Image (tube, rainbow, N blue to C red):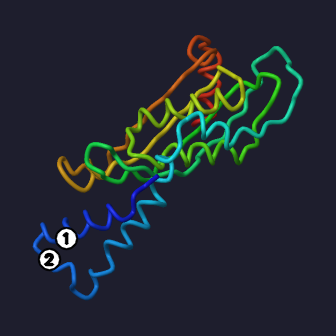
Amino acid sequence: MIDQEAIKRHVRGIIEALGDDPEREGIKETPDRVARMYAEVFEGMNYTNDEIAAMFSKCFDVPETGNHDMVVVKDIDVFSYCEHHLALMYDMKVTVAYIPKGKVIGLSKIARIADMVAKRLQLQERIGTDIAEVITKATGSEDVAVYIEGTHSCMTARGIRKSAARTVTTTLRGKFEKDMDLQNRLLMMLR
């Protein structure tokens, strides 16, 4: 569990290290606000991928057709925090695709999985890998693809300061990794 009392102490120390008075009006409640915010935005750190899969594994039986029927949920908005700088990764859009294996997961569950996985100190690459792993565990399908496009404030607001830079990552599992026709179908949907 996230230790909000420790966060309050450390945020107070950061305020002091920045040369400000932690008792100043306008700042004196900041450690508490930050601790509550961190408990919310880092909620996913409380759960393993297995636990997230169990939380959002409500599935419905469907007949297997033997072809490449595909479920795709596009443009799931998420945000996360880069584990290197604690900088915001924002304006992120996640697309998740999978081929059902006798059952489908509720569509809102896909968005909830993406959201919960992103609510950790993360790398964008790992967000895709974690989403794919959780979708596989929740649906039983090893045929999963995750496409993510996002902006990183560690590149836009500091350092190189390239405000138009977008990072794109893809995670391909099972048939998506091997079947070029399937990959092309997915890419056409992303355009």
Which quarter of the figure is the C terminus placed in? top right
Image-based side of 165 in relation to 2, left or right: left
Q: Nearer the viewer, residue 127 or 45?
A: 45
Residues packed near mark 1 inside 10 Å, few (<14), some (14 to 19) or many (20 plus):
some
Query: Disc 2 vs disc 1: Cβ atoms closer than 8 Å?
Result: yes
Amino acid type of the residue that numbered disc 1 sits on in the rendered structure: Ile
Marks 2 and 1, the one that precedes in the sequence:
1
The relative height of residue 114 versus residue 137 in the rendered view (above or below) is below
In terms of image quadrants, where is residue 84? Answer: top left
Residue sitting at the far bottom: 25
In terms of image quadrants, where is residue 73? Answer: top right
Q: Residue at x 75, y 19 (%)?
A: 68
Q: What SS does tag 1 mark?
A: helix
Q: Position of residue 82 (x, y in %)?
A: 34, 46
According to the picture, the residue beneath numbered tag 1 turns out to be 15
Q: Nearer the viewer, residue 112 or 164?
A: 112
Residue sitting at the far left: 19
The relative height of residue 181 versus residue 71 in the rendered view (above or below) is above
Amino acid type of the residue that numbered disc 2 sits on in the rendered structure: Asp
According to the picture, the residue beneath numbered tag 2 turns out to be 20
Q: Residue at x 32, y 45 (%)?
A: 165
Q: What SS does tag 2 mark?
A: loop
How far is the residue under mark 2 from the one under mark 1?
6 Å
Q: Residue at x 61, y 16 (%)?
A: 174
Q: Position of residue 51 (x, y in %)?
A: 60, 39
